[in-house]
Image (tube, coloured by chain):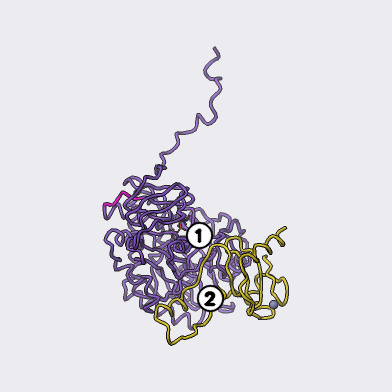
Chain colours: A yellow, B purple
Amino acid sequence: MQLIACPWCGPREEVEFHYGGQAHVPYPDDPGGLSDEEWAHYVFYRDNPRGRFAERWNHSAGCRRWFNAVRDTATYRFERVYRLDDPKPLATELATSRRNTAR
Amino acid sequence: MRPRSSTPRTPGADLPEHPDFLWRNPEPKRSYDVVIVGGGGHGLATAHYLAKNHGITNVAVLEKGWLAGGNMARNTTIIRSNYLWDESSAIYEHALKLWEGLEEDLGYPILFSQRGVLNLAHSLQDVRDSVRRVEANKLNGVDAEWLEPDEVRKICPIVNTSTDIRYPVLGATYQPRAGIAKHDYVAWGFARRADEAGIDLIQDCAVTGFATDGNRVTGVQTTRGTIGAGKVALCAAGHTSVLTDLLGIRVPVQSHPLQALVSELLEPVHPTVVMSNAVHVYVSQAHKGELVMGAGVDSYNGYGQRGAFHIIERQMAAAVELFPVFARAHLLRTWAGIVDVSPDASPIVGRTPYDNLYLNCGWGTGGFKATPGIGWALAHTIASDEPHPYVAPFSLDRFVTGALVDEHGAAAVAH
Ligand SMILES: Cc1cc2nc3c(=O)[nH]c(=O)nc-3n(C[C@H](O)[C@H](O)[C@H](O)COP(=O)(O)OP(=O)(O)OC[C@H]3O[C@@H](n4cnc5c(N)ncnc54)[C@H](O)[C@@H]3O)c2cc1C
Ligand SMILES: [Zn+2]
């Protein structure tokens, strides 16, 4: 079974986690000013890339805390886990970390 | 000279002739009136009905792998039309009527077996929702019945209807005309007919980009060169976003792995199709004898055509809960496809911001049953530049207008 490294608890089995979809989708700054189309994009549309994707995960059967991860949707490999208040890692940072961790 | 009988023979020389190929393997032409991206069931059915219903045959179906090697090869082949809303039952019932005449239309065996589908109810809320769905189905002319547990047992004696299990069977909806078909034969039947009509089925041809001119798509870039196109239809299922991203169009689908499994071959034991949303599994027995099972998607987005094993374990646990007799069956094989799930569990079909680009996606876990229906309606939409009434409610702009077609109740686990 795939292990996911919770930033607080360390590596745990995938079954302990709950998927939360795309990360870094902020609530609109000015909700009243949004058009129907803009609301549609906020409510229904999420990116769906093949490759790197910044996502939210919850360690629901563990510490029950949310965190973010960059995962490759083609290989399912986690490239980075980070706290919700951390900025989205840059592609260049990920490229180096991949080299460091790849065995 | 040695006697003839001892002359060494070329290996295989005594085998029968190779059967006729079902389709040519043509080189792509420079351009086509219609280019269909994706050679799964939907792309092939669309090609067939473009030729049959509209006389449009200067058409290519471009497939990045081999024909019908995506979800068409991987699905569990449940066919039914007992969806809740008018919009859904209209297109799924149209598809079911086409299934009923498809073998004749294609002149090819598809092993369509109308053995009926039971959708089990395990809670009071399930019962209420199911009875409501049965009534809605009847009003839409879809055959549907509500069955009490003893009637469920008559139709499928191996379902555990005892009252002391964790999720007792409180009844079921039953659609007698529902059933299964042989997915590969369906694809080959459509492919053969399309090929006979002169349509080019081009394998090993991945679309990697689009040529556009203002509001029009003028062609596709592929791994086998650039191909001009009068109209383009996307039938790429789980890979739709990868293509629409190239065009700068956003589509509200998420691609997920969806797994299924089969047991070893068994004597006929399971006469119908049984689906349970609450216990989370569905099971039928294929013609050859294997038990075919599936359930819900893996939770995360994924393009890997594989999923996690704990999902398979849960499916098997659920199956044994409902069918104690399966406890001794052996798991033979598991696999996954990539399904494109939409926010309201309904498809997204029709026009796009590009005048001559047509979208067909979002069928998620349940598009096999729609294959002839969507091919028929999408061909009409392409030919007349006007969404067919069957697909009009499933336009992309419903996410802006709010006119969703929420089929989570009928489609969540149930394919
Ligand atoms: C495990 C599983 C079980 C299922 N069970 C059922 C069921 O019981 N009943 C039901 O109704 N439905 C079921 N489904 C859903 C059903 O299989 C799909 O909704 C349906 O097959 C989608 O249409 P399609 O056949 O055209 O898709 P596909 O066969 O996936 O066709 C899409 C094609 O597009 C090709 N493609 C993608 N990108 C490109 C590109 N860039 N260039 C060229 N070609 C490209 C792919 O290679 C693929 O062949 C199931 C799916 C799975 C995975
Ligand atoms: Zn944790």
Question: In 3D space, how far apart are the residues under numbered discs 1 and 2 (Cα atoms)?
Answer: 21 Å
Q: Is residue B57 magenta?
A: yes
Q: How many numbered circles does the render carry? A: 2
Label 2, secondary structure: give it. Answer: loop
Q: Tell which subunit mark 2 falls on.
A: B
Residue receiving disc 2: B278
Q: Position of residue B294 (x, y in %)?
A: 53, 65
Q: Nearer the viewer, residue B141 or A9?
A: A9
Label 1, secondary structure: give it. Answer: strand
Q: Tell which subunit mark 1 falls on.
A: B
| Residue neighbourhood size for the residue with mark 1, other residues' Cα within 10 Å, grouped as few (<14), some (14–19), many (≥20) | many
Q: Position of residue B176 (x, y in %)?
A: 39, 67
Q: Is residue A40 left or right of residue B161?
A: left
| B391 relative to B305, above or below | below
Residue receiving disc 1: B285
Q: Residue at x 31, y 52 (%)?
A: B33
Query: Mark 1 is on which residue type?
Result: Gln
